[in-house]
Amino acid sequence: MPQFQKSGQRSFHAARRNFRPGGSGKGAHRSNGKQNIHPSKFINKATAYEEKPYEPAHRFADFPFGAELQYNIAKKGFELPSAIQDQAIPLIVEGRDVIGLANTGTGKTAAFLLPIIERQRGIMLRPSVLIVTPTRELAQQIVEEFNDFARGLDLEAALIVGGVNIDRQIRSLRRRPHFIVGTPGRLKDLIERRELQMKNMTTLVLDEADRMLDMGFLPDIKRIVGGMPRERQTLFFSATMTPDIKALTAQFLHDPATVQVRTGETSEHVEQDVIEARDKAHKIELLQDLLQRDGYTKVLVFGDTKYGVQRLSDLLHKSGIPSVAIHGNKNQSQRQKALQQFKDERVRVLVATDVAARGLDIPNVTHVINFDTPKTYEDYVHRIGRTGRGGASGRAHTFIDAR
């Protein structure tokens, strides 16, 4: 059986002893466009959660929602709201613009969906709600949650994302849904085709705004928002408040209330270490060995390229390790099917490019493995944030070159 450095302490000393200086500082990059991240940054002895359980000021039954919506909330088993739900819902009900600063996985989707759904009942002008997200998968998740909450309320949402037949989406828009949930590029395309009218929009939600800026969507977002009425409610959710984000909120929001419920970085609570590999073949051998061990029951593996991710997934599957892949070369239905198989634990391994690193709600991921090192340390934090969520334990391994 192949051997590798399992101990974080041993790995740390080996990495520090053998690391070649010259560019480990902020902004340093290798010739392939990656930051030269010191291997010690991938090593961490997990710290226990010390935050006290949040004590909400409300129960879901206290919010001014109709009987049908309250029934759907109860059917999902919701009784006590999370911090972002408890604090943001009353402000949204009041009609305030809101900036929500919260980690991924804190329940912010329900925080904005529930009060908007309640308000939309009986409204004749439509579409009147636009929800913009950075990725197809996150948009799909929001629509699924909308369908659960809006059951029996005669409300409809259209999913408008790339990678799907645009003619089908045009037909969906012509049915005049109440809610439109989409990604910036496809939304802009349909606005320019005059298939998406913004004049009746009363509510705008920008979800994972920091990620949309990271992905270069700012021009598209400005084009979309520029066509909306100035009199509207704007809800803005982000994990961070950078200068760019602050400038965007100043441009798009009016007298916003800020709800900040960010907790410590997820990476602090994930056991992290490095595994040294001689070459790619050795790396594959080590990965297969890891995935056959006890406890590796739901594993997310990250790779750099679409082709590399697909080849690695195919290789694992053929070697008897059930695996699927998601990347940019797959259309939306293929990506959604693969993601669902992983969520439902019909496969143990999901191999992905960074498209899956943020915004996805994948419960109970036991391990994250960085088969290829991330481009930036921020990408690393987003990747390993898929495990160790909600107080659960999590582990992350990162392959590095043997020294």
Image (cartoon, rainbow, N blue to C red):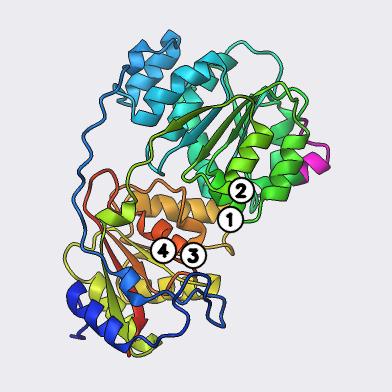
Task: Report the side of 9 relative to 282 (left or right).
Answer: left
Q: What residue is drawn where x is 56% and y is 35%?
A: 236
Q: CA distance from mark 1 to mark 4?
A: 14 Å
Task: Report the side of 266 relative to 304 (left or right).
Answer: left
**Pair 3/4: label in front:** 4
Label placed on residue 380: 4
- The answer to which quarter of the image holds residue 398 is bottom left
Label placed on residue 214: 1
Task: Provide the secondary structure element on which disc 4 rests.
Answer: helix
Task: Provide the secondary structure element on which disc 1 rests.
Answer: helix
Task: Provide the secondary structure element on which disc 2 rests.
Answer: helix
Please say if the residues under marks 1 and 3 sit with CB atoms less than 8 Å apart. no
Residue that carries the numbered disc 2 in the rendered image: 244
Q: Position of residue 271 (x, y in %)?
A: 23, 62
Q: Amino acid at mark 4?
A: Tyr
Please say if the residues under marks 3 and 4 sit with CB atoms less than 8 Å apart. no
- Can residue 362 be seen in the rendering of this structure? yes
Q: Amino acid at mark 3?
A: Thr
Q: Position of residue 352 (x, y in %)?
A: 45, 64
Q: CA distance from mark 1 to mark 3?
A: 15 Å
Please say if the residues under marks 2 and 3 sit with CB atoms less than 8 Å apart. no
Most foreground residue, 184 or 295: 184
Label placed on residue 72: none
Residue that carries the numbered disc 3 in the rendered image: 353
Q: Position of residue 219 (x, y in %)?
A: 73, 49
Quarter of the picture containing the C terminus is bottom left
Most foreground residue, 137 or 256: 256
Most foreground residue, 203 or 286: 203
Residue extent of the magenta highlight? 189-197
**Pair 4/2: label in front:** 2
